[in-house]
Image (cartoon, rainbow, N blue to C red):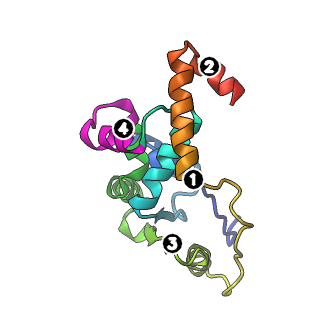
Amino acid sequence: PSGVTSLISSEWFASASDERVRMITEDLDPARLHAVLVVRPLVSTLPSAWQQGLKLGGRLSLTEWLRLIIEQEDDPRAQRVWSKHRYDEIARRWVSVLGPNRVTVIAANEEDPSFIFSSFGHLLGLRDGTLSMPPKRTNPSLSSFESDALAELNRIYFERGGTLHEYRAGV
């Protein structure tokens, strides 16, 4: 309906291929669609991506993982990471379909989590304070010790014949 504003948010949109971006745009209302890309510093997002990998059975230390994703760009793990964190490429894909006037990039302010909410409120034409902060994080990062311990446990598990299927079923 005319005059209705909707906000659809998903980190999965970041890794959408050119063709998927076209399909998403066509499925939604292409005449009214505006894409917003929120970028966080890689110094925050890469360790978080590594920890997510550990939770899925990853065995590399942070240093090993960073070396892999930076030096081995053809490795599927590196391609997966960069499909979500090459902000220039993500923006290019959306701009190529929507045009530069309908794509906004917001650089997240790590010291002010409310900045993202106030930025979205401004873009949506909402009164200041309409969008509120979510409750405290429900998916906290692992500590350095916890990350190292999980990587070592994963190494031992797989060295002793554990399978990825069993790992994911039990963790």
Determine whether 146 is above or below 162 in the image: below
Residue 108 x/y as whole percent:
49, 71
Badge 4 is on which residue?
79
Question: In this figure, which residue is indicated by the disc labeled 2?
Answer: 165
Residue 22 placement (x, y as % from top left) = 45, 47
Distance from the alpha carbon under mark 2 to that under mark 4: 22 Å
Query: Foreground mark, 1 or 2?
Result: 1
Q: Find numbered disc 2 in the image and state the secondary structure of the residue it sits on.
A: helix
Magenta segment boundaries in residue numbering: 62-79
**Upstream in sequence: badge 4 or badge 3:** 4
Instruction: Give yes or no for residue 75 being in the magenta stretch.
Output: yes
Which residue is disc 1 drawn over?
143
| Residue 67, horizontal then vertical, whole percent | 30, 41
In the image shown, does 161 or 37 lie closer to the viewer?
161
Q: Which residue is mark 3?
A: 110
Q: Amino acid at mark 3?
A: Glu
Which comes before the other along the chain, label 3 or label 2?
3
* C-alpha span from label 1 to label 2: 26 Å
What is the x, y in percent for residue 48?
51, 51
